[in-house]
Image (tube, rainbow, N blue to C red):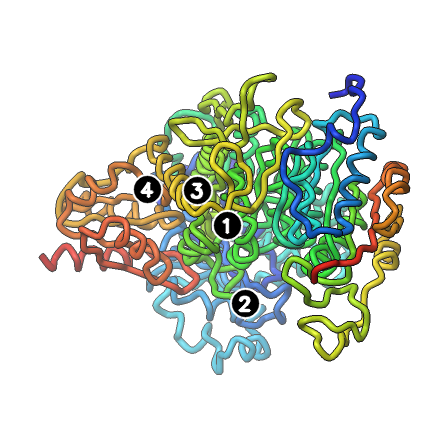
Amino acid sequence: MSTQPPTYTFKDFASDQEVRWCPGCGDYVILRGMQKALPLMGKRREDFVFISGIGCSSRFPYYMETYGFHTIHGRAPAIATGVKLSNPALSVWVMTGDGDGLAIGGNHMIHVIRRNVDLNVVLFNNKIYGLTKGQFSPTSDLGQKTKSSPYGNTQPPFNFGELTIGSAGQFYARIPDNNPNDMADILWPPKTTRVRRWSRSCKTA
Amino acid sequence: MSDTATTQDKNKIRLDRVVIRFAGDSGDGMQLTGSQFSDTSAMLGNDIATFPNYPAEIRAPEGSIYGVSGFQVHIGEVEISTPGDDVDVLVAMNPAALKTNISAVQHGKTIIVDVDEFTTKNLGKAGYSDNPLEDGTLSPYNLIPAPITQLSRGAIKEMGLDNTSMNRTRNMFALGMVFWMFSRPLDYTIKFLEKKFGHKPQIFEANVKVLKAGYHYAETMELLTSAYTILPAKMSEGTYRILMGNTALAWGFLAAAERSGKHLFLGSYPITPASDILHELSEHQHFGVTTFQAEDEIAGICSAIGASFAGNLALTTTSGPGLALKSEAIGLAVMTELPLVIVDVQRGGPSTGLPTKTEQADLLQAMYGRNGESPVIIVAPSSPSNCFDMAYEASRLALEHMTPVIILSDGYIANGSAPWRIRSVKELETIKPAAAPAPGEEWLPYLRNPETLARRWATPGMPGFEHRIGGLEKEDGTGHISYDPENHEHMVKLRAEKVRRVENYIPELQIDGAESGDLLVVGWGGTYGSLHTAVKALHEEGHQIGLAHFHYLNPMPRNTQDVFARYKKIVVCELNLGQFATLLRSTFPEFPYLKYNKVQGLPFTVFELNAHFRELLNAK
């Protein structure tokens, strides 16, 4: 596991699965950014594990030629914790969204940040439930009209950056989904539980 | 003290068994007192079974009925399978303890009370309008009224301890008395106190003084005309120690990790009465165990699923309400065909129910409590010491068949204790986990062993086997997401067949008593001790009665049908409203099933079982 890894390109991290996000979705940019960043990390391909919950973002592991686990709604941080504690040599990535990570999985999220077991969390924030076609999420804006808030959302949103700091997170960065070139830099910071958030606009919901 | 015990032996009455119950306020240290008596008796070689019965309240008001905590121990020269129905000696530290426990004592048996506690105030709290020590209520019993509080304080009055510390030694006085009555030496308890209070020499000294004071009081007091002795039981050769069910489970998992070559991982959330497994395993990091106390029940099982994905022998421990929370995650482990052991130490339900009381009402939850067709293996230990074996078995089945296994223990055997023969790890059959592919070998995530149907287990870090799994339906073989209707039905049947085939890898049903005849008693899990004792007695009387006790509930042993066909009547006995009977009716509908059920948070008594079986046998 510890021998010098081969020289990879982004293609080495693309699986044979057809990518099934809506045309124009920012998730494609995140996928390509990740595939470009992994060769820079000096790890072997078998040492990467991508773990997701449920939602558009959580399809992510299927498209990566690494170990991957598409789990159940909101629980990816807990499953990733089990993987990382079992084999600390692995580079473990939680791929989640604003509904998966901050609503149904909100409790797991704050605890995984608090514990700092050296995981990476990538939260795709499109401020809406995309897979279930358009209900408001914990990051939807006040007044935002959605299928489940036709007269405007009445619930104030979470600011994930504040939540991360409040949970004693060690690293937090945010990048819009129209900036693929800066992504590799964001994905390669020091060793600690890192939270990255993409602002993403949903083209469908 | 052991010298004294030997020289006295000639004057003692030999008993083959005795049941003693220590009862007092939850702050009186009754669990400790009872454990000391049990451990000392186990050291003397008696067979033994214990049953702690304590309130769920953290600390109920002193002297109240619902604050009474009890510990029952049954010791014998003969085989002991239950903590006993009727109490031979009741120690009641206050009126509430007497009130709540007297129904378990038959007339003519012994009751020891602390008379100092029978004050008007305490009698009122217990709901006595008259003092039962004076109004004749206790005349049918052999009453031993002892001024326990006063004598305990007297024994240590020179030591300058505060009131609370002095009163806390009372339980040692009662223990000393009972030690003398049954010719037990004091040295084991003295060593225990030394360890417990080594850093507080004064408290240690006070407890020892009071323990000895109780012992000598019993010796010199005229009410106790003779002492009793119970000789060592004849048990198969080996070194024994006393073990609680929860500890036995923990050790079974440690042994399974050792014999499978896997790292042990426990993801858990505290819940009564399962937390002791988490406590025990947390102490064993030197065996390479990882314990993770999660933020909730769901994270507990999910971390275990992650650990299983990463190649560990992974488990999660809980009780009924926690099993409900874990159900979606169990489905994920079914779908991804990962090995996982789920321990449910059952308690009274539904909802929060009776957290400290026992019940067997989670069977159908374990069997069916998930969305979709979601089969799992279910096993159930039958006694505290059998918990070790079933933990080992559950681990073996999970690792070799790549599927979740639920262990249904219960509060009764989890907290009960019994002698357990210490085994060498080498005596245990090796566990051969579903083999990881060899490097470079042709491999797909859902290629299967043609016999067990278990898929092969490639784990993160292994080069060349990078793959993705998840909760969406899988295409057989490749493991790719598939919405194909034919594939879904194929996979549903395949997952069911995989669990069904486990019947080829488990032992056949064993019968206690008559191999065929008039009545077959069917039981499962923690009721074994009572069922066995009741059936054995009737069989010895000449009745054609047998007991088929299930340790494997899904799938059931291959010979189940053959066994059932050999008896005229079948009665299914369980601590619920008939869940196993329901399961049997749907699995083997050709047999008529009678039911015998109890849902009081308490185990079966041998007496009630015996009476019921006799009725069934007589109604030919």
Q: Are marks 4 and 1 in contact (CB under 8 Å)?
A: no
User: In this rendering, does residue B116 appear at all?
Assistant: yes
Chain identifier of the residue bearing label 2 in the image: B
Residue B615 drawn at (x, y percent): 17, 59
Q: Chain of mark 3?
A: B
Q: Quadrant of the C terminus of chain B?
A: bottom left
Reading the image, the residue beneath label 1 is: B344
Check disc 2: other Cα within 10 Å, few if <14, some if 14-19, many if 20+: many
Q: From the viewer's perspective, is residue B175 above or below residue B265?
A: below
- Identify residue for label 2: B94
Specify which label sits upstream in the sequence, 4 or 3: 3
Graded by Cα atoms within 10 Å as few (under 14), some (14 to 19) or many (20 or more), the crowding at tag 1 reads many
* Residue B562 lies in quadrant: top left
Q: Quadrant of residue B49?
A: top left
Q: Which residue is mark 4?
A: B556
Determine whether the residue tagged by mark 2 lies in a helix, strand or loop: loop
What is the distance, in whole Å, between disc 2 and disc 1 at their CAs? Answer: 35 Å
Mark 3–mark 2 CB contact (< 8 Å): no
Q: Nearer the viewer, residue B54 or B428?
A: B428
Label 3: element kind: helix
| Quarter of the image that includes the N terminus of chain B | top right
Say which amino acid is labelled 1.
Asp
At label 3, counting other C-alpha atoms closer than 10 Å, the crowd grade (few under 14, some 14-19, many 20 or more) is: some
Looking at the picture, which amino acid does disc 4 mark? Met
